[in-house]
Amino acid sequence: MSAGSADVTVCIPAYRAGDFIGRTLDSVRRQTYGNLRILVSLDGPDADTEAQCRAAADDRLELIVQPEPLGWLGNTNFLIGRAATDFFFILPHDDTILPDYVETLRGEALAHPEAVITFCDVTCVGLSDDIRSTPGLDGSFVERIGAMLSTPHEGVAWRGLVRRSVAGSRLMPDNDFDGFNAHVTWLLELLCLGPFHHVPQRLYLRWRRDDPDSVTTRWRAWSPDRRYSAMAEHTLQCIRVVSAAGAADPNERRALVLLLLMRLLANRSGKLAAAAAPEPQVDLDLMRLSELIGRLNGLDLPGPEARRALAGDPALASWMERLKSGRTAQAAGLAPGQPKTG
C-alpha cells in the first residue's frame, strides 16, 4: 500500500537514533492497519540514523534530513505541519507500538467523531516499569480542562491519534526554556476544541533510557531556580490558552486559573526536581507566587475585579498559609484529585 492513499500519518522526530530507531520503524511496519504515511525527520545530518531508516525499504516512508538541527520542539512541529492525512500521531524515535495500535485507535476515532484525540494506556519499560493511564477527557470545556489538570499523567494523550480536521496544523508553542512542557500546553489547546477519547488498552510502549541527549535529561539537570522559572512560564502559557478559549461563566474561568496556580504550587520547584534536592524556601515560594499573580494583569483575563478576587481567593490563601507553616505542598493537604503532574 502506498503513502498516497494513506489516511494516518506517523510522525517520527529522530535525533542520534541509530541504536534504536530500527526497532521503532519495525513496530510501525508490523501494524495490522497498513494505510499509513510514515514521516521521519532527522534533526541534523547523522549517517548512522539515516542508514537505519533507508534500510527499512518501505515505500510508505519519507525521510527528511534537516540541514541544521531544529531542536526537539522544532523538529516535532515540522512533522505536525507536514501531516496532511485524516489522522496523525507522534511517535518519538525510541518508542514502539503494538501491532494493533493504529487499527484499534482509528476504529475508535471513527466511532467517536467528536474526539479530537483518541488515546490508549502507555506501558513504560526500561529504567522504570509502570503503566500510565488517564480517563477520557469529556464533558464541558471547564470539566475537560479541570480533569486534565487534575490527572497524575497529563501527557498520556500526547501519544494518541489526533484528528487533523479539528486540530489542523496547530503547532506546539515554544518558550524560553527549551520547549519545557510544550506538549502539555498543546494538549490544552486541543482540549479546548473538543474531548479526548480513552481506549483502555495497553498498545503503546514508552522506552525509558539513560540518554544524555534526551530533552528531559537536560531539564532534570537544571537548577531548582531554573526549573521553577520554566514551570512558571509554562503556567502562564496555559493560563493564556484557557483564558483565550473562554468559559461562559467568569467564575469558571477564574477557577481554571486558580487550578493552574495551585498546580504550580504543587510542583514547587518543578516536577523534575531531584528527590535529593533541598526543600525550597517557603518565603521564596510565596514571593514567586505573588509575582506570578502580578503578571496576570498583562493577560486577557475577565476584568480587574476577577483578578483581584483571584489574588485573594480563600482556597489559594489557605494554601499559602499552610506553606507558611513550613509543610511541603503535598503535606499541606491536597484534596483528592488536586493537580499533580507526573
Image (cartoon, helix red, strand yellow):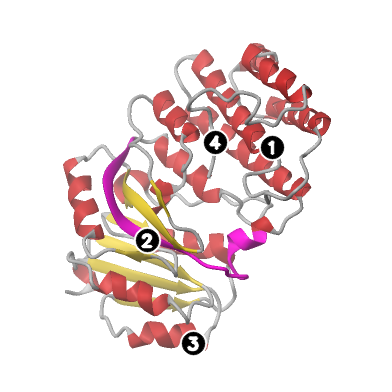
Q: Secondary structure at mark 1?
A: loop
Q: CA distance from mark 2 to mark 1?
A: 30 Å
Image position of 277 with respect to 242: above or below: below
Q: Residue at x 76, y 26 (%)?
A: 290
Per the rendering, the mark at residue 48 is 3
Label tally: 4
Image quadrant for the N terminus? Answer: bottom left
Dot 4, how many residues are within 10 Å of its Cα: few (below 14), some (14-19), or many (20+)?
A: many
Frontmost residue, 311 versus 302:
311
The residue beneath circle 2 is: 205
The image position of residue 246, as x and y in percent, is 48, 25
Label whose residue precedes the other's in the sequence (4 or 1): 1
Q: Quadrant of residue 263?
A: top right
Q: Residue at x 16, y 42 (%)?
A: 111
Q: Amino acid at mark 1?
A: Arg
Q: CA distance from mark 3 to mark 2?
A: 24 Å
Is 207 magenta? The answer is: yes
The image position of residue 289, as x and y in percent, is 74, 29
Q: CA distance from mark 3 to mark 4?
A: 39 Å
Q: Secondary structure at mark 4?
A: loop
> In this picture, which residue range is highlighted in magenta?
195-218
